[in-house]
Image (cartoon, rainbow, N blue to C red):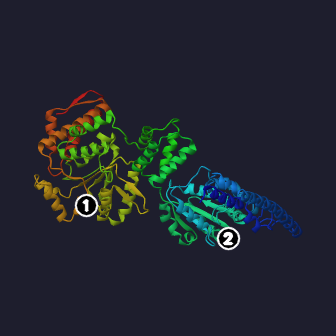
Amino acid sequence: MHPGIKSWKNLVIYAFNAFSIPLFLKTLFLPWRMDRGAGAHLTFIEKIVFFIFSRVLGFLARTILIILGLAFTILIILTFPIFFFLPINISTDYLQNLGSFWASLSYGDTYNLNTHGQDIVGSSMQKIYGKDKALRMIERGLSKETNHNVLLVGDNGVGKSTLISYLGRLGQSGLSFPGVRNHRIVELTLEGLSLSDFDKCLQEAANAGNVIVVLENIHAYEMLYERLVPYLHMPHLGIIATTDLSNYDQVLKNHPEFLSKFGKVDISETNAADTLLILKNQARALKISIKLEALQEIVRLSDRLIHNQNEPGKSLSILEELQTLGKTITVEDVRQIVSDKTNMPIGEIGADERKVLVELEVSMRRKIVGQYEAVKDVSKALKRLRTGVADHSKPAGSFLFLGPTGVGKTHTAKILAESYFGRKNAMIRFDMSEFALAGSVNVFTVRLASVIEEAPLSLVFFDELEKSNTLIRNLLLQVLDEGRLTRESGREASFKDAIIIATSNASSAEIIANPGIDKKSLINSLIQSGIFAPEFLNRFNNIVLFKPLDQGETRKIASLMLDEFAERLLEDKKITLVITDALIDKISAAGFDPEFGARPIKRAIEEIVENKVADYIMAGNTGGSLKII
């Protein structure tokens, strides 16, 4: 269609609706500022006078406005030749922003609702991307003959409030569905609202005839459900309620009768393309100077690294933080902000981090005796992660440590977390014996998803995996294969920046009996015994064997443990512990046990060293040097 003719057509339709001509014709003889509850306190004669006066006033006012609207519409119709020859472009979006005139004169006042609620009118800069289907469903739901109530279900940040705000602008424009056209969208603040005020507000909204009431987080107000039901049936009142996925499942589904009064509209996250369009529009609205590649980096990094929030909310929050910089935003600015928010290194590897990565294997070997294969493999995984060459559809690295108790499986994981992540609490430990029952699956899922959302760059440690329920190991297949975990609500937690280490003592007897056993034979034994399924074992990047400690390795561990204790003693008590070869030999001899590994060494240090240090302090000694023979 010719752009001028299309603009002229849009303007004619707008003029007819903007002056609310159809509405005024329909309500021509109704009272002025109609209120279905007005006049209840008046006498019979006063009611008659009020009735006649309000209707005459309403008739005169609406007649004048109809005449003005028709005159304006005819004027627009007569300008057709101008639009035909001149390249005038007037879009429906532009006309919607202008709104309609005087439509509220056909409806009643809402004094209490105005006190306890807030009108929602969207900004003229506001646009909807990726939510057109949801918007149409909301408009249709509010325009139904019965049960014209809508429940928006979606997690925080997916755009529920934006949709409601945009709906408020549509309601003022007169160019929307009947159930929204010329309607006010009013959010009622439920917190702290008395029951009597609650009833007054909803009754006023129903009497006014042009109000859609918004009830945010309806799951938090179960005590109001029964009280709310009569209002859900009222012909002149629409209600929009909101909730999130988890509370929809856990709270609202327990009230099927109440839920049946609403049309459910699922609000999902926006995709990357729509999120980018939203960021562009928001940057324009906030007058933020930002390069396109910086906006693209916001979308990329928020998708990759921020997993406990949703799009477009998480990207918009980054943009708002960048606004405070007060300059043209670059890609490096985006990376710095996201790095600060997530505590994750982003971008080029700095000199300090490069040094840590290069020396990581050597550094770990100083603190770990034997088990060099495990040290080498986890070091390589971290280097792949930080250089960006890792397969980002899976965890950064996944390892299964097989071996007897006390040989260093847990210690290796702790040293890795401390050496690279810089903090011991970077290792998130799960004692899998706590999840042996089938009923523990949901608890495990919630805990695992929660901790990884809080700290996506972590080492997740599953201790004694063979003791967990088979259902949980099946659940971990998705984590190992796809780098994500799906909750019952459908929400996903990402493990794509995590290192996963699981341990198992299931093969201990065979390894102790035959320290030279090869990995393949041991894995076949685990599969044949039914402890682990082959498809589960195949999901790990590497399966690492931890062999029993020999006497030489036991002596090295004893030396390391004594050094750690001496360092702590000097720092806390200012006492210097003299460590001799004789003391190391004594500890290693007392602590050597092929079946229990290094654990007896700690007990030997407690008995031979720590008890004597305690006696030394109890004797009144402070500081000084102590030699134990």
Q: Is residue 184 left or right of residue 341?
A: right
At horizontal 84% and vertical 67% (from top left) the residue drawn is: 51
Whether residue 8 is situated above or below residue 561 in the rendered picture: below
Q: Is residue 189 visible?
A: no
Q: Residue at x 48, y 53 (%)?
A: 274
Task: Report helix, strand or loop for mark 1.
Answer: helix
Amino acid on which the number 2 mark rests in the picture: Pro
The x and y percentages for residue 88 are 64, 52
Q: Nearer the viewer, residue 314 or 362?
A: 314
Give the residue at the far top of this rendering: 624
Task: Residue at 51%, 48% (x, y): give it.
Answer: 279
Using residue 53 as the reference point, say whether residue 476 is left or right of it: left
Please give the label number shown on residue 536. 1
* Quadrant of image for the C terminus: top left
Rendered image quadrant of residue 60:
bottom right
The picture quadrant where one finds residue 47 is: bottom right
Q: CA distance from mark 2 to mark 1?
A: 58 Å
Task: State left or right for residue 289 relative to residue 369.
Answer: right
Can you tell which mark lies on residue 235? 2
Residue 305 % position (x, y): 40, 48
Residue lying at 57% horizontally and 45% vertically, measured from the top left: 285
Q: Considering the image in quadrants, where does the N terminus appear?
A: bottom right
Mark nearest the camera among 2 and 1 is 2
